[in-house]
Image: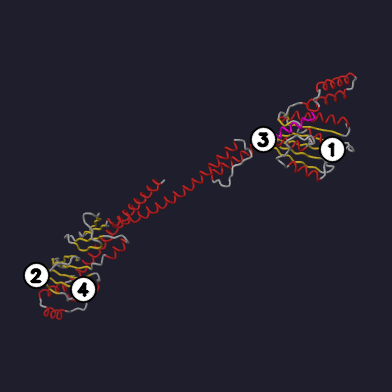
């Protein structure tokens, strides 16, 4: 991680240097272009000013008179020659007007061909003076403008227009911004006209060069120490921040992994204790974070489900034993009982007592089913068992009780716990039949729905009071059951709650039951089992 951060800091420093270098080059290019444009502009303006001094014969004559006459004679000649208020022949007036109209001009020099004197004027001394030609040296920051007679096109000489050294400063400063620049302007004669900014080595710096249409060369360079100094400053900040970040990261990771290690050790220790037999122990999740918290919670949930499954299996065993209790009580000598019942049935047949023979046969079949050790049965067999039981009960009251059972063909082989529907039928015949009526009836329907199985057990018997119904509904809403570890003989072995418990243990959350009843309006059990 430290190597990554250090590499990142180096990359940032390089990126900063590269960005500064490219930005400096872009600005230098813009300064070069802008300076070339400014030089072109001032050369064009200077050319127009020089040409304005010789734009007509009167002004040309005034210049020549100035060079050929003495000063008093020149003034006298001006007085005689002045014929128009719009055309000035006075060199003094024309030069003064040039200074007034153009702030960037600092000096004017006129060199005529075949004359041994030169006229030199400055903004401070506008009237100027004549000096020997051999003593004249043009100022460095001046444009040499050749002039000619506009009529004959004869070369008259050269006029030097000197510019203020500050004329380029504004344009360059506005373009370069905060980046230092070295800017030089060189004339076609390779003399340096302007130098703006720092003094830099011509060999060590990378110069951007631009040339005007008249041969003036503009050279721009950014001092290398500017980019290097700026990069070193930003690099120092980046490195400092990186070191600070590394320290913070180290302290944070040290604290994090120390806490993480503590959580892992606690998790492993807890699992080892549980593996040694402490099934009731759970992993402490109060000090666990993120994935370790997820592992701890998942492990605790798994242990809870495992404990519940063990408990459910134990309860299923108890319920199965409870359902077989009466059968176990009848197993003292089952073969003797079957043989005796078969003897009685055959005797009834011999005596032409067919109805009695049928009753004995159904009772014998019912007894065999009760004594059987099977824990599961098919839905068809369970309904057949209910039919036999209902038939035996109906024999006592043949004119007041009826029953009916219906099962969808595709549900006949469906596996369910044994003795789960018969208790509901038995409960009806024990408590629901109203012997004052002749239309007592119970029905069971097993139907296949879309993704579920529906079992309806309905009767029109006495029903149950609201208090008893509410108590029963509360018990049927429970999904977990608590029983004593030792079997209690006083506990009711077969009943509605027993049926509910065994269905829950067998089908789990796929099973649901509801009950509806009112006094003298019968009872309706609605059982649904979702498909797997």
Query: Looking at the image, is mark 1 or mark 3 earlier in the sequence?
Result: 3
**Left or right side of 367 for 130:** left
Q: Quadrant of the N terminus?
A: top left
Badge 3 is on which residue?
310
Query: What x and y, as percent, mark residue 41?
Result: 25, 64
Is residue 288 rendered to the left or right of residue 315? Answer: left
Q: Residue at x 85, y 31 (%)?
A: 393
Mark 2 or mark 4, earlier in chain: 2
Give the Cα separation between the discs numbered 1 and 2: 152 Å
Mark 4 lies on a secondary structure that is loop
10 Å crowding of disc 4: few (<14), some (14-19), many (20+)? some
How would you rate the neighbour count of disc 2 (Cα within 10 Å): few for under 14, some for 14-19, many for 20 or more?
Answer: few
> Is label 4 or label 1 in front?
1
Residue closer to the observer: 244 or 65: 244
Which residue was labeled with disc 2?
Answer: 116
The relative height of residue 249 versus residue 68 in the rendered view (above or below) is above
């Amino acid at each position: 991680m430290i190597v990554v951060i250090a590499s990142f800091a180096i990359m940032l420093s390089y990126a900063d240097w590269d960005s500064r270098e490219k930005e400096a080059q872009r600005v230098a290019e813009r300064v070069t272009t802008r300076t070339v444009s400014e030089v072109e502009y001032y050369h064009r303006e200077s050319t127009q000013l020089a040409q304005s001094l010789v734009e007509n014969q009167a002004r040309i004559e005034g210049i020549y008179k100035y060079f050929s006459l003495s000063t008093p004679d020149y003034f006298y000649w001006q007085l005689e020659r002045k014929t128009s208020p719009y055309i000035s022949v006075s060199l003094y007036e024309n030069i003064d007007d040039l200074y007034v109209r153009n702030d960037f001009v600092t000096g004017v020099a006129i060199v005529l061909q075949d004359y041994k004197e030169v006229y030199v004027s400055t903004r401070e001394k506008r009237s100027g003076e004549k000096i020997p030609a051999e003593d004249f040296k043009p100022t460095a920051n001046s444009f040499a403008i050749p002039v000619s007679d506009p009529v004959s096109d004869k070369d008259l000489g050269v006029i030097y227009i000197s510019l203020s050294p500050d004329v380029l400063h504004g344009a360059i400063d506005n373009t370069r911004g905060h980046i230092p620049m070295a800017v030089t302007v060189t004339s076609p004669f390779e003399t340096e006209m302007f130098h703006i900014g720092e003094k830099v080595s011509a060999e060590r710096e990378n110069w951007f060069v631009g040339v005007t249409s008249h041969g003036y060369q503009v050279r721009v360079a950014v001092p290398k120490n500017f980019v290097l100094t700026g990069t070193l400053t930003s690099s120092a900040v980046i490195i400092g921040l990186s070191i600070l970040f590394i320290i913070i990261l180290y302290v944070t990771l040290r604290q994090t992994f120390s806490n993480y290690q503590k959580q892992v050790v606690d998790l492993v220790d807890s699992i080892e204790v549980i593996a040694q037999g402490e099934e009731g122990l759970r992993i402490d999740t109060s000090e666990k974070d993120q994935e370790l918290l997820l592992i701890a919670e998942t492990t605790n949930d798994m242990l809870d489900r495992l404990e519940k499954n063990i408990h459910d299996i134990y309860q299923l065993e108890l319920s199965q034993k409870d359902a077989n209790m009466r059968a176990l009580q009848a197993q003292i000598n089952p073969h003797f009982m079957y043989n005796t019942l078969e003897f009685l049935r055959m005797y009834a047949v011999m005596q032409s007592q067919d109805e009695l023979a049928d009753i004995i046969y159904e009772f014998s079949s019912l007894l065999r089913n009760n004594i059987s050790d099977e824990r599961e049965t098919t839905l068809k067999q369970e309904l057949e068992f209910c039919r036999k039981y209902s038939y035996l009960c109906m024999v006592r009251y043949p004119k007041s009780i009826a029953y009916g059972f219906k099962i969808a063909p595709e549900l006949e082989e469906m596996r369910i716990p044994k003795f789960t529907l018969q208790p509901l039928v038995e409960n009806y015949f024990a408590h629901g039949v109203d012997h004052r009526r002749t239309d007592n009836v119970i029905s069971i329907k097993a139907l296949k729905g879309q993704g579920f199985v529906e079992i309806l057990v309905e009767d029109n018997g006495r029903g149950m009071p609201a208090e008893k119904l509410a108590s029963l509904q509360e018990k049927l809403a429970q999904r977990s059951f608590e029983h004593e570890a030792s079997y209690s003989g006083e506990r009711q072995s077969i009943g509605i709650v027993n049926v509910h418990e065994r269905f829950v243990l067998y089908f789990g959350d796929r099973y649901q039951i509801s009950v509806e009843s009112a006094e003298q309006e019968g009872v309706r059990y609605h059982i649904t089992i979702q498909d797997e």
